[in-house]
Image (cartoon, grey):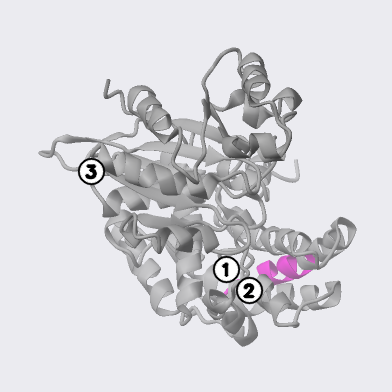
């Protein structure tokens, strides 16, 4: 057998764009970039997805996720969560990441995931906690995922969320969306083939995306949380 | 999972707020109904908060915040990502988080009104999100709406027919529309309102007190 069927099925479940964790309400900057005339077609979408994956997810979210995956207890996880808070300069991005993370955690609290239940107690008492990559690590531990499966789920849900938002924004149709997903799948696999050094610090450089998200509250028309 | 939670080992058990959904087509008067329900509920001493799901702007949330009817901090807006169905049914997690957050910030809140974005007749609320939900249609949308038997009309705990004052002006036989609505709903509640003038609001609050808050 080439893979663990149960784990593969669990990955399909948690990595599904329909997984009920609020992902559909986040465009992670696409709505703002489209409104500012910087995103109008599939080529631009692919470039932005590549930026999101290579310059933010792989260097920031993935590092936080790996640390949280191996953290010994809730207090140690919270320290990584605070690093996510401190390392995200845009208030809108911080808020979006926490809302997405808390929604995911909330589902697993209702599913009685033991670490999710314990960590949610801390998150409820500290407004700085609950960032998405940290929550993904927590629920993945409750789902008995390996680190590799956790990273796949995290990267892939970003891709499906971005492409799905682009479809709803009218930037691409459903067929073009599949081409974008296929391209992103290749890039994600390349990124995952490289293991970050153990002392890697979380960092990101996606200025246009960060600005687009930060400008969110200034926009009168706004369908997405980020 | 029970929504009756212990705040601490020594505290009194805290019963979670009842969550009441308000859905319905665009322009049927959902926000106007919320604006009428707020003072009516407060007058009866019911501690409330509000969540709105605006589709493309935060206009409804801002309208309620600026109304002077309720502390603006008790009004939360949840973006629907262009999916008004999804955010109240298939994936209500963001609304659940917003409601949980309101309960954390305002201990003692008894009832949270959750206004959906304008949608169509197939719109329904998840039972994981709401304890009770109502569907608002209006006479100007056409007196054939009940006969179309949309899931919103059929499955809501309460159907509200709003803008009844417009019936003679849009050629609607209100008695027949009411009768047909009761018929397709198996005689479950259908209440008539004119939110502009506050008519019919007390009957809704009576029903909420009786069926949701179990006060009578």
Q: The residue tagged with tag 1: helix, strand or loop?
A: loop
Above or below: residue A115 compared with residue A157: above
- The majority secondary structure of the magenta stretch comes to helix
The lab-note entry on whether marks 3 and 2 share a chain reads: no
- Kindly report the distance in space between the C-alpha atoms of the residues bearing marks 2 and 1: 6 Å
At 46% from the left and 72% from the top, the residue drawn is A94
At 50% from the left and 62% from the top, the residue drawn is A132
The lab-note entry on whether marks 1 and 3 share a chain reads: no
The lab-note entry on whether marks 2 and 1 share a chain reads: yes
Q: Quadrant of the N terminus of chain A?
A: top right
The tag on residue A29 is 2
Instruction: Specify the segment rendered in magenta.
Output: A186-196
Please give the residue where the numbered disc 1 appears in the rendered image. A226
Above or below: residue B181 compared with residue A56: above
Residue B102 horizontal/vertical position (percent): 34, 51
Residue at mark 3: chain = B
- Kindly report the distance in space between the C-alpha atoms of the residues bearing marks 1 and 3: 31 Å
The tag on residue B160 is none
Q: The residue tagged with tag 2: helix, strand or loop?
A: loop
- Kindly report the distance in space between the C-alpha atoms of the residues bearing marks 3 and 2: 37 Å
The tag on residue B108 is 3
Residue A130 horizontal/vertical position (percent): 41, 60
Residue at mark 1: chain = A
Residue B68 horizontal/vertical position (percent): 34, 60
Would you call the spot at circle 2 few (<14 residues within 10 Å), some (14-19), or many (20 or more)? many
């Amino acid at each position: 057998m080439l893979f663990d069927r149960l784990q593969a099925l669990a990955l399909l479940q948690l990595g599904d764009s329909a997984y009920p964790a609020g992902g559909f309400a986040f465009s992670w900057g696409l709505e703002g970039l489209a409104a500012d005339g910087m995103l109008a077609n599939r080529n631009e979408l692919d470039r932005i997805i590549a930026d999101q994956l290579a310059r933010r997810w792989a260097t920031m979210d993935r590092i936080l996720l790996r640390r949280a995956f191996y953290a010994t207890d809730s207090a140690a996880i919270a320290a990584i969560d605070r690093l996510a808070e401190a390392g995200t300069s845009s208030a809108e991005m911080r808020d979006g990441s926490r809302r997405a993370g808390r929604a995911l955690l909330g589902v697993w609290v209702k599913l009685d995931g033991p670490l999710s239940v314990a960590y949610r107690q801390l998150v409820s008492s500290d407004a700085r906690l609950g960032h998405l990559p940290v929550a993904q690590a927590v629920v993945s531990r409750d789902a008995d995922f390996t680190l590799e499966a956790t990273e796949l789920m995290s990267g892939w849900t970003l891709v499906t969320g971005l492409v799905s938002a682009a479809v709803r924004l009218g930037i691409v149709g459903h067929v073009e969306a599949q081409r974008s997903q296929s391209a992103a799948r290749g890039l994600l696999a390349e990124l995952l083939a490289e293991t970050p050094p153990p002392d890697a610090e979380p960092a990101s450089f996606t200025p246009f995306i960060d600005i687009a998200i930060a400008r969110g509250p200034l926009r009168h028309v706004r369908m997405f949380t980020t | 999972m029970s929504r009756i939670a212990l705040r601490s080992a020594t505290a009194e058990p805290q019963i979670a707020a009842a969550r009441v959904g308000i859905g319905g087509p665009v322009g049927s008067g959902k926000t106007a109904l919320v604006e009428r329900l707020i003072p009516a509920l407060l007058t009866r001493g019911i501690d409330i908060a509000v969540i709105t799901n605006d589709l493309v702007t935060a206009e409804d949330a801002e309208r309620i915040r600026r109304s002077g009817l309720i502390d603006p901090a008790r009004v939360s807006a949840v973006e629907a990502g262009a999916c008004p169905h999804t955010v109240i049914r298939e994936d209500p997690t963001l609304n659940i988080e917003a409601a949980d957050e309101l309960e954390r910030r305002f201990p003692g809140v008894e009832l949270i009104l959750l206004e959906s974005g304008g949608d169509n007749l197939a719109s329904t609320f998840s039972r994981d999100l709401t304890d009770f939900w109502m569907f608002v249609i209006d006479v100007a949308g056409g007196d054939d709406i009940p006969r179309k038997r949309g899931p919103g009309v059929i499955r809501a705990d309460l159907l509200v027919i709003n803008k009844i004052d417009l019936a003679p002006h849009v050629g609607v036989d209100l008695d027949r529309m009411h009768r047909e609505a009761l018929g397709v709903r198996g005689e479950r509640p259908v209440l008539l309102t004119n939110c502009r003038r506050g008519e019919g609001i007390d009957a809704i609050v009576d029903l909420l007190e009786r069926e949701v808050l179990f006060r009578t």
